[in-house]
Image: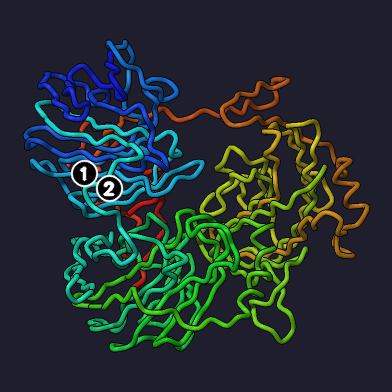
Amino acid sequence: MTITIKGFVCAPTFHVAADNCTVYVANVEGANLHTNLIQGVTSMSSNGRFFEVELLQDLTDNFLMIGTNSAAATGSGQVRAGAGVAQQIMWNLHLSIRYASNDGGIYTAGSGLRSDHVYGVKGDRITVYLEDSYPTRSLINFFLNGRLVFRQWVGTNGSQLYPAVGCSQGPATFKVTWPRSNAVPAFNMLNFTASLLNWLGYRNIDRDDVNNTLTMLAHDDKPRAGYSVQAPRPLDKDHTYFEVELLTTMDANIGPSIGLTPGFTSRYQYPGWKFNTIGYHSDDGRFYNDCGDMYMTGERLDTSVKVGSRMGCGIVFEPDSRRTHRESQLVLVYFTRDDEIVYKKVRLLPEGGFYPTVGLYGKGDTVKVVNSTSPPFISPNFRDIFEAWRPVYCDFRFSEGLRYSDLLVQDHGNTEESCSILGYCTLTVNSVQTHSIQCHRKYEDECFFKVRIDKLSDEGEIQIGAAQKTFAVHGALLRQRKQTAMYFSKNKGNTFPISKGDCIHVLIKKEDPGTSKIHFLINNHIGHRLVVKHNFSEPFYPTICFTGGAATISVAWQPPDGIPFAPGVFTEEEMQQTVNGGTIQFVESMMKPEGTETKPTNDKLPVIKNTRADEAPVFSPANEECNETDQIPGPAVYNDKQAVLGKNKRGKNNKTSKSGACAMM
């Protein structure tokens, strides 16, 4: 049973004073940690982005969990005043986020990560701040006594974020400032030039506000590829540039680095080593774009940086854009050395924006951070760069690790920035990582594309098919996702293996509203036909995945409406064979959207059942193995297996996140 009174609901062990803010938790033996909580009935929104909890007594032999929960406790978030109401509330495992007092762990999506900051002393003030919200996720900041201690994504939008405080057992006394439009936090929210103490990341990087320096003090007890700290705010249209000066470098082989990373990133990686990151490394002068494989294939220029020199990084936002600095859009990222631009790259800004990030490794390495310096002069022709690249991002979604030149053709005598999109292109991948590309040009009734396998290593695998626009183009394979239509690969166990020289035609044909047929023609023989059910507004699009090793393919994409295929790309005979069934009979199967079950029309057809994994217990400890069977958080240690040092100084990076909806720190 829970009790609903004037804007919040709570377990019977919680007693709220007349001010509706002061809360006392009674000591009841055997209290259920899943349900022993108090929760607001008004969600956090643009008018009420934070709530605060102040401890009024020390925590002894118990702990609090402060954060947001996704379940509306009273239905539609309406306030219900008066007597108690028989209703059950509990933490949602996957869609809540919680900051534990006993170990400083941050828990969400069934996993825990360590913040390095515990609380539990009388007077401690914990602030939960909604930094930004999107349709499928929200970025949450946690502050302890005015200092930013952690930033993490939670897999729900702002309208489903309800302030909540859980308690393992009483006694406990605290005061809650619930979200409201006129509430004022106990401290000013961060600005771009906030204290270096608010830079998030590795705990043994010293932040010195007096000298404005960052210094590597010591490594931890694990072999790491690198360490980093991240600014508390992303670059925006008023602050487009930051710079560091190298004061000391203790190891010439592993020097400091700077770059840009999304709102939540690994503290054990240099910028540029992870998806959605870009970095400039002083030791080898290389620029890294989403390079996560062990070969660390950055672009090499003579741009190494020595002690006394300065490295800078900035963003040029698209002119006249009405989008904010947190909305996904094209930006021009550039790096400087001693005020001279040495590299620039068009990138897609991730949700939440790009945050300045500094990487350090050598013990004693020190850099001075300069936030207030003016950005260098950028040539006015950058407008042409946006015009050239806009069609790529309008028509394609792809892993940023793919070379852009693979999608484009260069004009004779000009640079890569003056490129135009082709309907026919060659894609080359030399990485062991998984990369994907999806063409999501609008089409009316059918979409037809062709792939020729030019090269495929023994370890490499290519998957060709169709997927909905929700398909994750970084790190995902067609065979691993339920919203995909079909795949072909080099795996010997596959029904339809492909190899060098093979040619695959794929036709995506809309039938009745919400139904499409996917036809696959391999070397002019029909390989498969799949009937798919989908949302009316979510059609299937051409999708190609690479993984495991080197590969080169030639692709003829569906051209924009009204533009014919290039001469010789398709023949009328090939199209007719694909539509009519090729030279052998179709193999049919059925597939429906996620969360449904399809029964076969006869005993020979398979049942495709899409079910969601059972929810694990909420309170798993923040440790390496992330044991989801433990009910109470244990000592938090770093969940870092993917960041250990590999076969070279840069490290090997082939582990995946255990947290599901969030990346790993």
* Residue name at image x 39 percent, y 54 percent: 655
Task: Name which residue type carries label 2.
Answer: Phe
Q: Is residue 393 above or below residue 629?
A: below
Give the quadrant of residue 544: bottom right
Crowdedness near tag 2: few (<14), some (14–19) or many (≥20) residues, C-alpha within 10 Å: many
Q: Quadrant of the N terminus?
A: top left
How many callouts does the rendering have? 2
Of 432 and 273, which appears nearest the observer? 273
- Is residue 625 in view? no
Name the disc covering residue 126, or none.
1
Q: Quadrant of the C terminus?
A: bottom left
Which percent across, then down, holds residue 26? 11, 21
Check contact, mark 2 vs mark 1: CB within 8 A: yes
Judged from this view, the residue extending furthest toward the front is: 182
In the picture provided, is 551 more to the left or to the right than 292?
Answer: right
Q: Nearer the viewer, residue 561 or 42?
A: 42
Q: Residue at x 77, y 63 (%)?
A: 423
State the residue at coordinates (46%, 60%): 275
Query: On residue 142, which mark appears?
Result: 2
Residue type at numbered disc 1: Ile
Left or right of 51 on screen, residue 62: left
Residue 111 position in % (x across, y down): 32, 41
Q: Position of residue 173 (x, y in %)?
A: 12, 30
- Quarter of image, res 648: bottom left
Quadrant housing residue 79: top left
* Helix, strand or loop status at disc 1: strand
Residue shown at the point (77%, 37%) measured from the top left: 517
Q: Is residue 563 above or below residue 2?
A: below
165 or 97: which is nearer to us? 165
